[in-house]
Amino acid sequence: MKVSSRGEYALRALIALGLQEGNVSTIADISGQTLVPAAYLEQILLQLKMLGYLKSRRGKKGGYMLAKAPDQIVIGEVIRSLEGPLAPMGCVSITSYEACPLEGTCLLKPFWALIRDSIAQLLDQTTLAHLIERKL
């Protein structure tokens, strides 16, 4: 599993908005806090809104805010929504399995599956609230 800049920037934006929970933040404010270019950030925020993590307000006092409480935003769900499967190799992916000609005799498959499960467990047990409160 590799997290792209889109995934990292999305998490940065969620943290910035989580720290302002209940308040509206502009793209410029979020960009300044996260060091994500505003044009790229706007695309990411729109995607997070479409996924149900954010809501927006239009107008002069407009911007973005969390659509859910930080303890209801599971990091594993966010990453899967933005990045796809967590498995390091297709042969151990639960959602995007890819057959391998060595599968029957491969001694690496259990190792890759362990990595997948460890990553998934950590991400699925971590909420935005954990990150904001630094409770990892």
Image: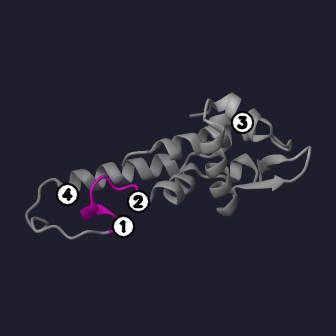
Mark 2, mark 1: which one is toward the viewer?
2
* For marks 1 and 3 on the same chain, the one whose residue lies earlier in the sequence: 3
The correct choice, above or below, for 41 with respect to 73 in the image is above
Q: Quadrant of residue 49?
A: bottom right
Which residue type does callout 2 highlight? Pro
- Left or right: 113 as drawn, with respect to 27: left
Q: Quadrant of residue 27?
A: top right
Residue 30, numbered label: 3
Are the residues at dot 4 and dot 2 in contact (C-beta closer than 8 Å)?
no
* For marks 2 and 3 on the same chain, the one whose residue lies earlier in the sequence: 3
One can see residue 133 in this view: no
Q: CA distance from mark 4 to mark 2?
A: 16 Å
Label 1 neighbour load within 10 Å: few <14, some 14-19, many 20+: few
Which residue type does callout 4 highlight? Lys
Q: Is residue 61 magenta?
A: no
Quadrant in the picture for the C terminus = top right
Count of number-bearing discs: 4
Range drawn in magenta: 86-96
Which residue type does callout 3 highlight? Ile
- Left or right: 124 as drawn, with respect to 62: left
